[in-house]
Image (cartoon, grey):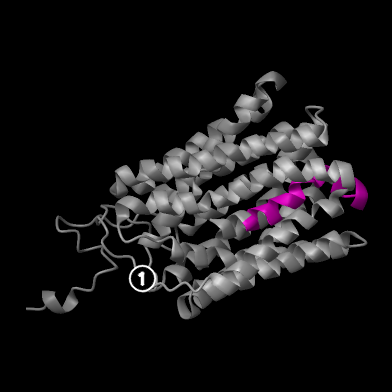
């Protein structure tokens, strides 16, 4: 959770100070969206490799490498003289973020299915938790001292966390990420079909991260500090929503995919609040948006882990993160293009809602075959072939 919070702090931090960065580097709406997109492009490139390295070497060395890489990337971005070097720094930060995620999936993967959604979701709550700190702290520091000095805070956080893991994090995972003790759900996610859910949901989520600050400043007339607090409220909803949705999915592990559909449709409905509610109700609406539009991640990671082969949780979740990060790369650019073309932020939020609806549809077509009464027909984690031979 600490590793993901540090990563969220670094990745969301640049978007939290987007109004200041935009003026300094002369970025367009598409350029603002590209801040998040470039970061997740870097993460996309290293997610699969990070997963394989975790399965082979263990999570400790992978976590330390990823955190220190993020610190290096933030350093390059903060000292950049122009937009080009700034985006190079953001890309390096993303490379580190992609390395970190699969290792945390192996560490947080419990034995029992009735705990998996909650535990994975609590771990994933580290991302919006880091974003909360970014939204609450960095715009205020940036307004007082400039966005470059504000970047020192996430830089130091990643560096300290990375050194802490390197020196003290001798973590061993005896089961090598094996998923055992499953409740044998009636329906399993079929891979790679199910990866599409992560693509569209992450695209919508990161678009909301990337554009909310700028939207609140340009469309709602808030100053940078108040807009940053608005993003913090949005992420508070995400911190609450992730363990809440994970706990709900653990009540019926056999219905985990249906929970993914419900949270996707709830996110589509919640996004409409961004342009519908009056300014006075934004402090109420923003946490609701975060609760519904950001809370899907832990349940999805649990579903992917349950579809993984023995000893390949890192590799499988790393592959899923490749699609998650691809969505995070492309969708903010799409939303920024739609806003620029239409000349209205409303259409950008409509695009995010449509992405959420698409996520619910993808789950409907990525269900694995139903199991028989004993549950063995579609059980990829237990090899009973020799026992069943006549």
Residue at (61%, 27%) from the top-left corner?
A: 285
Per the rendered image, the range of residues in magenta is 6-27
Identify the residue at image location x=67%, y=45%. 133
Q: Quadrant of residue 205?
A: top right
Q: Is residue 83 left or right of residue 288?
A: right
Image position, residue 207 (x, y; %): 67, 45
Q: Give whichever of 10, 255 is nearer the camera.
A: 10
Q: Which residue is mark 1?
A: 309
- In the rendering, at what x and y percent does residue 51 appear? 51, 71
From the viewer's perspective, is residue 38 above or below residue 336?
below
- 93 in relation to 327, above or below: below
Q: Give SS at disc 1.
A: loop
Determine the residue positioned at 39% across, 50% down.
Answer: 117
Residue 24: in magenta span: yes
Q: Is residue 136 magenta?
A: no
Note whether 177 is above or below 258 in the view shown: below
Q: Is residue 11 visible?
A: yes
């Amino acid at each position: 959770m600490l590793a993901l919070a540090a990563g969220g702090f670094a990745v969301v931090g640049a978007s939290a100070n987007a109004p200041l960065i935009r003026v300094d580097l002369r970025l367009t709406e598409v350029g603002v969206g590209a801040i998040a997109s470039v970061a997740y492009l870097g993460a996309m490139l290293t997610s699969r490799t990070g997963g394989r390295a975790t399965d082979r070497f263990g999570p400790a060395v992978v976590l330390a490498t990823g955190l220190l890489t993020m610190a290096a990337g933030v350093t390059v971005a903060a000292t950049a003289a122009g937009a080009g070097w700034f985006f190079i720094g953001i890309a390096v930060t993303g490379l580190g973020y992609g390395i970190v995620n699969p290792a945390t999936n192996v560490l947080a993967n419990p034995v029992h299915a009735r705990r998996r959604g909650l535990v994975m979701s609590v771990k994933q709550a580290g991302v919006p938790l880091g974003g909360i700190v970014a939204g609450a702290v960095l715009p205020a520091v940036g307004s007082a001292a400039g966005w470059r000095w504000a970047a020192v805070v996430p830089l130091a956080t990643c560096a300290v966390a990375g050194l802490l893991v390197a020196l003290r994090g001798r973590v061993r995972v005896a089961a090598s990420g094996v998923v055992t003790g499953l409740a044998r759900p009636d329906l399993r996610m079929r891979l790679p079909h199910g990866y599409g859910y992560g693509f569209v949901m992450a695209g919508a989520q990161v678009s909301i991260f990337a554009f909310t600050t700028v939207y609140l400043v340009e469309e709602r007339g808030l100053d940078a500090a108040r807009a940053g607090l608005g993003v913090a409220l949005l992420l508070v909803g995400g911190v609450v929503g992730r363990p809440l949705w994970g706990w709900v999915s653990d009540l019926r592990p056999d219905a985990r995919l249906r929970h993914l559909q419900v949270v996707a449709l709830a996110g589509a409905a919640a996004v409409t609040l961004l342009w519908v509610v009056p300014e006075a109700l934004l402090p109420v609406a923003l946490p609701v948006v975060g609760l519904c539009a950001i809370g899907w991640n832990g349940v999805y990671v649990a579903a992917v882990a349950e579809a993984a082969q023995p000893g390949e949780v890192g590799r499988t979740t790393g592959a899923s993160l490749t699609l998650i990060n691809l969505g995070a790369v492309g969708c903010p650019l799409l939303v920024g293009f739609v806003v620029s073309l239409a000349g209205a932020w409303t259409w950008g939020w409509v695009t995010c809602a449509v992405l959420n609806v698409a996520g619910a549809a993808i789950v409907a077509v990525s269900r694995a075959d139903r199991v028989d009464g004993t549950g063995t027909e579609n059980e990829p984690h237990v090899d009973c072939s020799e026992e069943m031979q006549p």
